[in-house]
Image: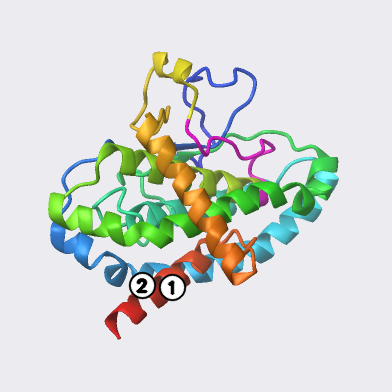
Amino acid sequence: MTTGWEPRPSDGVDSGEWRPALDVPAPGRQRRWTVLLRWLLLLPQFIVVALLSLAAFFVTIAGWFSALVLGRLPDPIASFLGSVLAYQTRVSASSTLLVDRYPPFAFDAPEYPVQIELRRTPLNRLAVFFRLILVIPAAIISSLAMSGWFTICWVFWLIGIILGRLPEPVFGATAAVVRYRMRLSAYMMLLTPVYPKGILGDEPASAAEQAYSATRPLVLDTAAKVLVWVFLLLGLAGHLTSGTVDYDTDYDTDYARSSAAVERAVR
């Protein structure tokens, strides 16, 4: 996994540039009752993620000052933030119906089907200093994509209940958004110097490399790419209608929105 900072063999992507990687198994059968009650079942996890995100915020501030001096994150800070990011990503993958298995209440979950991989890399002090400014474009893209996904996620929820699984295009587009969100958080937490990329998946050429999982490499077909654009456009329309754009990069914000949507549906 990830927080141990032990790299796997190079997958050939961008040769000299390592992007945080997401591993999710191929879409399979899901229990319909867990799909039906997914967000309700995950409410305890949303609370844990909110608390961890709050702690990670203050640790990231300490890491920012440390990185300015050292040009890297100290090991304890990197380990904690990497563990929080892995935890957030597991819960995010479950809440977006990428996997059926319930995420464990633990930092270290080597047997869980959703994994991320980070690699220790020196940080550019100038980029660290201006991180909050540099991240704005990527934060906007992530916010639009997640908002668009939440706008039509009820369709995916119905599909999951009817079919007992997610179709390939829906799985691919959702995984692309979750992976981009994870990379954005890794960049904000100073766990990587590489700017978030890959909202439309990986280049087709990377498919010739050895595949570690269904999302590594993440090669989207035309339908999945169109669906990602739909997310972005719906998110943009929603923000224009409300007159605001949310730059927040914490998962708990989106979980709060999803919980509010569930409450409105119940009422």
Q: Identity of the amino acid at label 1?
A: Ile
Local secondary structure at mark 2:
helix
Q: What span is colored magenta in the figure?
A: 188-201
- Quarter of the image where the C terminus is located: bottom left
Position of residue 28 relative to residue 59, above or below, is: above
Q: Is residue 199 magenta?
A: yes
Q: Residues within 10 Å of mark 2 (few under 14, many from 20)?
A: few
Q: Identity of the amino acid at label 2?
A: Pro
**Number of the label disc, if any, that sits on residue 44:** 2
Residue 226: image quadrant is: top left
The reply, left or right, for residue 143 in relation to residue 178 is right
- C-beta proximity under 8 Å, tags 1 and 2: yes
Q: Main secondary structure of the magenta part?
A: loop
Q: CA distance from mark 1 to mark 2?
A: 5 Å
Identified at 28% across, 49% down, the residue is: 99
Q: Which residue is mark 1?
A: 47
**Number of the label disc, if any, that sits on residue 171:** none
Q: Is residue 23 visible?
A: no
Depth check: give the residue in front, 184 or 163: 163
Residue 138 position in % (x across, y down): 64, 47
Residue 149 position in % (x across, y down): 43, 55
Depth check: give the residue in front, 40 or 174: 174
Residue 227 position in % (x across, y down): 40, 43
Q: Is residue 18 visible?
A: yes
Residue 200 position in % (x across, y down): 49, 35
Identified at 33% across, 32% down, the residue is: 214
Identified at 37% across, 22% down, the residue is: 211
